Image (spheres, rainbow, N blue to C red):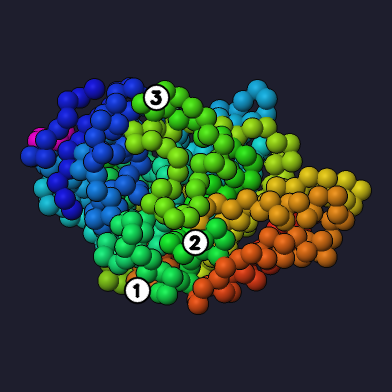
Amino acid sequence: MRPLTYTRAATIEDAVALVAADPATAFLAGGTTEVDLIRAGVSRADHLVDINALPLAGVEATADGGLRIGALARMSDVARAPAVAERFPAISRALVLGASEQLRNMASLGGNLRQRTRCAYLRDGVSPCNKRAPGSGCAALEGFNRGHAILGTSDHCIATHPSDVAVALVAFDAVVETHGPAGGRRIAIDDFFLEPGTTPDIEHPLAHGELIVAIDVPPAPIARRSIYLKFRDRQSYEFALVSVAVALEVREGVVAGVRLALGGVGTRPWRARRAEAALLGQPADAIAFRRAAQAELEHAAPREHNGFKVELAKRALIRGLAEAGR
Amino acid sequence: MTPARQAATLPVTLRINGTTHAPALEPRTSLLDALREHLDLTGTKKGCDQGTCGACTVWVDGRRVLSCLILAVAAEGHDVTTIEGLADGDDLHPMQQAFIEHDAFQCGYCTSGQIMSAVKLIEEGHADSDEDIAEYMSGNICRCAAYPNIRAAIRAVRDEATT
């Protein structure tokens, strides 16, 4: 591991100023991604600004029925918070199904949103990878791409976004609040995760030194019975091959409201808007569920080893809708 | 705000198992390496060194975490507990004793991490069923696959604790 320098920030303003001033300086929160990537030689940071002392760890049930989750709240604490489990069970479940309890005790929600893909070609430090070394190519396109994305891909990158909780946050239109060198702003989560396009190295719209301070989840009564299902190669402590966040409201047999998002198949947490549009106003039955799943995966772009994800994603959507409608 | 620290070694004040140490460390030194290489606390094991195996599990402020992904300098001001801090003199912690009685290890390399995790598992209330035990112990890999015996040890301590 390369030598590092380290500073403990006492205020948000200090933290932002320190990181913004130097391209090789990074925030240190839970460390589960950052320390790992520095050790692997993927992150080029050589100065870390420890933000763990900042007062950003709260989980608040807002008066309007939503949530305000501090960027430094740990995954395990957010999963356990009664307001999260009551108002947005899919968020709680997605957190519990991610990583291990040790990692959940460390990893912050802000860090979770900024974690890097687990694509082995990014992390090996030497393969062509347009995320790590823009312009070097993408080894995954013709490589071992069984775990890679089938939605939102480009000829430059097919890396899967690894987060579980982000899938649920995307389903419920969360808002990412940041504080940066230019002040504070709020970013709709749809605009926070960028598809790779021709610039896979740019994963989110944050300026260098812009710090996530909170994640707001607006009230959504439909979410009170939401679910999160995760399908993977082993039963626990594994990334999703496919996951799905679902909330469904059925009135007199007809779909009156629906939120759908997919994980494990997209270059970003994937809001399944085509499927949602196909379902609204339709009878809540197996035929409509399958038609919606078809609509979402119609434009999937599988590669040599991940073709199975197309059908798996459809089945996950159908099962999720069936279970959420019960 | 503390001034920027240089890459050179600096004394880092660590409170481990109730004792304060101040080894000279570089900021890049992990808590795991500080324990093993600088403080002779070799009960905590280095497996993968990338947060996937759980062999390095310790407690920081009473929560189970992975010492390989924590910089030692970032652990200043926090209480660290390692496997060496579990026994009361010569009296083993009930979980240590249960691991022996249930033959819950073969090579033993993952064992200290398993035990540090298992004690917290019960405190967290995640040991009600075998399914829960398997789920919430999944961050501790045992390459010898002693899992059935590990679960038996955990059940024994759980049942002792609840009766």
Residue identifier under label 1: B144
The disc placed on residue A286 is none
- The label nearer to you, 3 versus 1, is 3
Residue drawn 49% across the image and 38% down it = A77
Quick one: SS at disc 2?
loop
The quarter of the picture where the N terminus of chain B appears is top left
Residue type at tag 3: Ala
State which chain disc 2 sits on: A
State which chain disc 3 sits on: A
Q: Which residues are magenta?
A: B10-15
Taking depth in this image into account, of B136 and B18 the one nearest to the observer is: B136
**Predominant SS of the magenta segment:** strand
Tell me the distance, in whole angstroms, between the alpha carbons under discs 3 and 1: 54 Å
Residue identifier under label 3: A182
Residue drawn 35% across the image and 41% down it = A30
- Extreme residue in the bottom direction: A304
